Image (tube, helix red, strand yellow):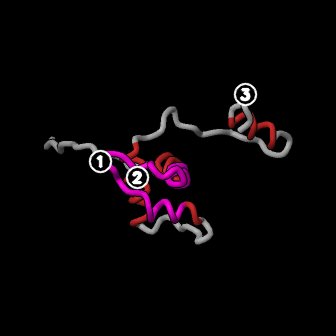
Amino acid sequence: TRSGYSDYTIIDEEFRGHYELSYRVPAANPPVKDRVNAMNSRLSKSAILIDTLCKYLIDDFEQIVWKKDELDKSDKNRTHASDGFGYYIATEFPLVKKSSYTIQNI
């Protein structure tokens, strides 16, 4: 990005007059484990198709490992693609916690 401008300002300026934009941005990023679990859920159901041209994303999926309770981010070339894609998946396809309920006789 250019210094002094937010990403949204730059995007708005570039597309002004061509497209009407709206943003769906969560107030906060989901916890890492929730994001990873949402991604793993979609992958395990074959609900995501990843083009073989997405080399950085594929490399992330193949090379990122857990280090204690967090993702190992020691390699500066890793996690950017999968983090970004994971934020999208966790926002659009969040895992819903099942609530417990009791059925009562009436």
Q: Position of residue 52 (x, y in %)?
A: 58, 72
Query: Which of the two residues, 29 or 96, is positioned nearer the viewer here?
Result: 29
Q: Residue at x 48, y 38 (%)?
A: 29
At horizontal 43% and vertical 41% (from top left) the residue drawn is: 30
Is 53 left or right of 26, judged from the image as shown? right
Residue 58 x/y as whole percent: 52, 65
Specify the amino acid type for callout 2.
Val
Callout 3 secondary element: loop
Which element carries disc 2, helix, strand or loop?
Answer: helix
Does the magenta run of residues contain 34? no
- Residue 8 is left or right of residue 35, and the answer is right
Of circles 2 and 3, which is in front? Answer: 3
Residue 36: image tag:
2
- Residue picked out by circle 3: 4
User: Disc 3 versus disc 1: distance between alpha carbons?
Assistant: 37 Å
Residue reaching furthest to the right: 17
Q: Amino acid at mark 3?
A: Gly
Q: Which residues are magenta?
A: 57-84
Q: Earlier in the sequence, mark 1 or mark 2?
A: 2
Query: What's the distance in space between the residues labelled 1 and 2, CA to CA?
Result: 15 Å
Q: Which residue is mark 1?
A: 68
Residue 79 x/y as whole percent: 50, 52
Q: Residues within 10 Å of mark 3 (few under 14, many from 20)?
A: few
Q: Upstream in the sequence, badge 3 or badge 1? A: 3
Q: Outermost residue toward the left? A: 105
Inter-mark Cα distance, 2 to 3: 32 Å
Confirm whether residue 59 shows in the render. Answer: yes
